[in-house]
Image (cartoon, helix red, strand yellow):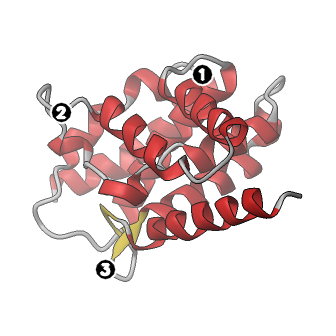
């Protein structure tokens, strides 16, 4: 492989490492903020474990989408869903951040990563729809098991991402189980 291409890839890997320190609004079961990298890891784990439940899904593509979906947060961090407003076009901002992050890569690699992100963002394929659903489920699950501060809005979670999780019987069923736990927490 070309030396310059390898140096660009290493620079991209080094810049992507920031995702390990990018915190999200969710808390772990031990009470610390989870990182975007940790969220993406469990999202991938969910995809692997549930693979057989989704016939016709390309697991390799699904995993790529899961890995790429929050990669742009290495630049400017995560915007929690409860803080997103119509004034903030999260998708446009994240796309720009991903363009910046992938700049050290060859145009071919940059195009491939941006294409995967676009596919995820627009839920263009069965894999992208499933990645979106699992992303929402992972977030909701973390909120039910984290040692959360008293101000977490569990009522918000009752409707969060339903348009993605309710598209499929398996994700809808998982959502129903998580919603039971969420509702109990909301009543506390």
Tags 3 and 2 touching, CB below 8 Å = no
Which marked residue is nearer to the observer: mark 2 or mark 1? 2
Q: Residues within 10 Å of mark 2 (few under 14, many from 20)?
A: few
Sequence-earlier tag: 3 or 1: 3
**Residue at position x 75%, y 56% from top?**
5
Label drawn at residue 88: 2
* The N terminus, quarter of image: bottom right
When asked about the image quadrant of residue 36, the answer is bottom left
> SS for tag 1?
loop
Query: Dot 1 corresponds to which residue?
Result: 168
* The C terminus, quarter of image: bottom left
**Residue at position x 39%, y 27% from top?**
162
Tags 3 and 1 touching, CB below 8 Å = no
| Cα–Cα gap, marks 2 and 1 | 29 Å
Q: Say whether residue 177 is visible.
A: no
Could you tell whether 41 is left or right of 49 in the image? left
Label drawn at residue 31: 3
Q: Residues within 10 Å of mark 1 (few under 14, many from 20)?
A: few
Could you tell whether 143 is left or right of 135 in the image? left
Tags 2 and 1 touching, CB below 8 Å = no
């Amino acid at each position: 492989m070309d030396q310059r291409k390898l140096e660009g890839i290493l620079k991209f890997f080094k810049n992507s490492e920031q995702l390990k320190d990018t915190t999200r609004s969710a808390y772990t079961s031990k009470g610390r903020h989870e990182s975007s990298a940790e969220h993406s890891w469990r999202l991938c784990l969910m995809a692997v474990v549930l693979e057989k439940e989704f016939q016709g899904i390309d697991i390799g593509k699904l995993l790529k989408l899961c890995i790429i979906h929050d990669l742009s947060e290495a630049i400017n961090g995560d915007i929690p869903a409860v803080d997103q407003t119509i004034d903030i076009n999260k998708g446009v901002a994240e796309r720009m951040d991903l363009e910046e992050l992938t700049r050290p890569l060859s145009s071919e690699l940059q195009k491939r990563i941006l294409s995967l992100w676009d596919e995820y963002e627009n839920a263009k394929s069965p894999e992208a729809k499933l990645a979106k659903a699992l992303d929402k489920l992972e977030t909701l699950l973390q909120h039910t098991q984290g040692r959360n501060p008293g101000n977490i809005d569990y009522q918000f979670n009752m409707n969060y991402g339903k348009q993605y999780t309710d598209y499929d019987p398996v994700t809808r069923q998982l959502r129903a189980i998580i919603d039971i736990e969420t509702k109990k927490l909301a009543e506390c």
